[in-house]
Image: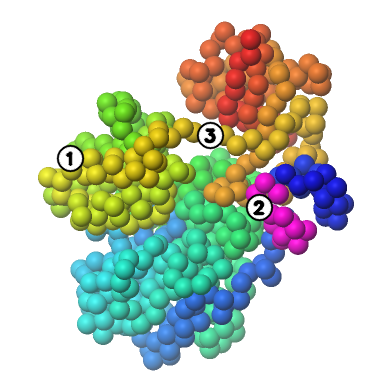
């Protein structure tokens, strides 16, 4: 941590508390200028187009093709990042007077990314310009086929490229070349592309801020690092989401039970809006979610939001059964470093969610596989911070029919006969990467904080650090010794605790989600230390302060 005099000086220069200076310092933000940018990430701080490798060139290819009368089609993906990317470009083209078509693959029948059948169908519909969003960088044969059909092809993606790039007319991918933010979400790439096109197309340019709600939605949902350029886009976009000017967003807020003017933070996006958008692609067709984001009026939007809410409810029911079964199977692989679980009847639409739960519960990289109608096994994986899932799959690629993704999430396909070999190879890859040392979850505490120091001013200041996510975790504090005054169960899995800090003479309520089994009635009256985050709670129009409990240790 910095020396006290430096903390005092920075706090004085920025008019913030020493605690906030220390929190910023621990996140690698070290100078007054960096701290000011982090706390006030205005749009003026977005990098210039020429700083993004290939951005201007990609915009010029699209502008030229449009000028030649080539009709564009946007090819997206069925997750939130892909759907928001598709909606953004379609809305942009419409506002600029360019008629555009689109295609989002059906998850169950087409799978992720480009496919020749879909490309050939677009060609029959007169498409001369194919623009991918959130996909395309690994689809070399499909891009070649589009070129054979006479299309101009532009790849807009953010996934890791392979050793060879597709033969597209232009590629915009922040992981290629020197870019200000290699980990930009797919919708962030689409936004930048629309922004440069906005100056290249004839006619009056648009105010691009109108699309930031979609950018925030896709960026938060895709769990990219919420620092740098992503932070600027997400922070400003969340403000637009709160306003809810888009009918589809307002209708989504309604089915989530959020009030019209409610703040949409990363939790409400990640656990409320995003799952309902994702549910369309998982159990139905992502087209429903796209239509919601494109809806012009509340009547249409409410009908579509209700449909998505129904998908999400159904998804939760299916997921609960599969989760219980997967966790049982995971216990049988308890000694392994990498978990690969398979059942032929598991629903393809929820295996990613189950992989997250298994990885979290057992603190191991986890891959969940199910049978696909193609005769292959199809899977989704999630990882832990210590292991790059993408690199792990690279080590096993000789056994895979295809794969792609990120460090912490990936998808894959393999032949059924290669399952046993893949299980061994993946376990070996994880073991080697971790030096054969079993990984253990570790909480990094920011600072000690007594209940007497918690007030509205502190929480308002902590909110300046939001949005929280990858590379910018919620502040986590260590309590002094506190006593459990009361334990109140909430449903079957959750529990409220009333906790007393005797030294500060303050009692506060804490929520422990999914921890009822680990906090039995016997904790009442006992002293404990807490790892916690203080937060605002709104209920029936009244705002109070409560504690989100992450971990604890009983004393004595």
Q: Relative to 116, does residue 241 appear above or below in the rendering?
A: above
Is residue 244 at all visible to an observer of this figure? Answer: no
Q: Residue furthest front?
A: 435
Is residue 413 at all visible to an observer of this figure? Answer: yes
Residue ID for mark 1: 420
Separation of residues labelled 3 and 2 (CA atoms): 19 Å
- Packing grade of label 3 (10 A; few <14, some 14-19, many >=20) is few
Q: Please tell me which of labels 1 and 3 falls first in the chain.
A: 1
What residue is shown at x 42% (from left), y 52% (from top)?
407
Separation of residues labelled 2 and 1 (CA atoms): 43 Å
Q: Disc 2 on helix, strand or loop? A: loop
Q: Please tell me which of labels 2 and 1 falls first in the chain.
A: 2
263 vs 298, nearest the viewer? 263
Residue ID for mark 3: 442
53 vs 276, nearest the viewer? 53
Q: Magenta span covers which residues?
A: 25-38
* Quadrant position of the N terminus in the picture: top right
Report whether 356 appears left or right of 233.
left
Q: Please tell me which of labels 3 and 2 falls first in the chain.
A: 2
Q: Residue furthest bottom?
A: 68
Separation of residues labelled 1 and 3 (CA atoms): 31 Å
395 vs 312, nearest the viewer? 395
Which disc number belongs to residue 28?
Answer: 2
User: Would you say the residues marked 2 and 1 are in contact, meaning their CB atoms lie under 8 Å apart?
Assistant: no
What residue is shown at x 45% (from left), y 67% (from top)?
175
User: Would you say the residues marked 1 and 3 are in contact, meaning their CB atoms lie under 8 Å apart?
Assistant: no
């Amino acid at each position: 941590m910095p020396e006290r005099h430096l903390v005092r000086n920075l706090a004085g220069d920025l008019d913030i508390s020493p605690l906030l200076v220390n929190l910023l310092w621990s996140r690698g933000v070290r100078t007054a200028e960096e701290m000011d940018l982090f706390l006030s990430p205005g749009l003026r701080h977005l990098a210039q187009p020429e700083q993004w490798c290939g951005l201007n060139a990609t915009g010029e290819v699209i502008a030229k093709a449009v000028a030649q009368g080539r009709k564009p089609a946007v090819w997206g993906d069925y997750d939130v990042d892909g759907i928001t990317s598709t909606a953004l470009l379609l809305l942009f083209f419409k506002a600029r007077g360019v008629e555009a078509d689109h295609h989002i693959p059906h998850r169950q029948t087409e799978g992720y990314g480009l496919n020749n059948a879909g490309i050939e169908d677009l060609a029959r519909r007169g498409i001369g310009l194919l623009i991918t969003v959130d996909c395309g960088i690994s689809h070399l044969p499909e891009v070649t086929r589009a070129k054979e059909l006479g299309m101009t092809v532009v790849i807009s993606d953010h996934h890791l490229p392979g050793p060879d790039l597709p033969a597209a007319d232009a590629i915009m991918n922040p992981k290629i070349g020197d870019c200000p933010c290699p980990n930009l979400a797919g919708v962030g790439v689409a936004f930048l592309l629309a922004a440069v096109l906005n100056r290249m197309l004839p006619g009056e340019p648009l105010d691009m801020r109108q699309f930031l709600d979609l950018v925030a939605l896709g960026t938060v949902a895709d769990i990219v690092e919420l620092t740098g350029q992503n932070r600027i886009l997400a922070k400003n976009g969340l403000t637009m989401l709160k306003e809810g000017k888009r009918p589809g967003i307002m209708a989504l807020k309604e089915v989530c039970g959020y009030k019209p003017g409610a703040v949409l933070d990363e939790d409400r996006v990640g656990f409320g809006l995003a799952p309902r958008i994702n549910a369309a692609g998982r159990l139905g067709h992502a087209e429903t979610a796209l239509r919601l984001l494109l809806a012009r009026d509340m009547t249409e939007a409410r009908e579509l939001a209700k449909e998505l809410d129904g998908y999400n409810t159904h998804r939760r029911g299916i997921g609960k059964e599969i989760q219980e079964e997967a966790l049982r199977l995971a216990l049988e692989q308890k000694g392994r470093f990498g978990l690969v679980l398979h059942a032929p009847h598991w629903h393809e639409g929820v295996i990613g969610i189950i992989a997250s739960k298994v990885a979290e519960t057992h603190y191991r990289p986890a891959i969940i596989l199910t049978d696909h109608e193609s005769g292959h096994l199809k899977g989704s994986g999630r990882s832990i911070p210590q292991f790059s899932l993408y690199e792990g799959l690279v080590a096993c690629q000789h056994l895979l029919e295809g794969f792609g993704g990120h460090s912490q999430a990936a998808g894959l396909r393999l032949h059924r006969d290669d399952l046993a070999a893949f299980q061994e190879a993946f376990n070996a890859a994880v073991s080697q990467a971790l030096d054969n040392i079993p990984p253990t979850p570790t909480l990094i505490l920011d600072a000690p904080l007594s209940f007497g120091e918690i007030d509205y001013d502190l929480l308002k200041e902590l909110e300046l650090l939001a949005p929280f996510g990858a590379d910018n975790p919620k502040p986590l504090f260590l309590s002094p010794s506190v006593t459990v005054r009361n334990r109140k169960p909430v449903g079957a899995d959750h529990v409220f605790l009333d906790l007393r800090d005797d030294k500060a003479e303050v009692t506060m309520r804490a929520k422990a989600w999914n921890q009822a089994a680990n906090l039995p009635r016997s904790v009442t009256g006992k002293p404990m230390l807490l790892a916690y985050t203080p937060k605002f709670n709104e209920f029936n129009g009244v705002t109070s302060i409560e504690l989100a409990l992450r971990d604890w240790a009983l004393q004595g």
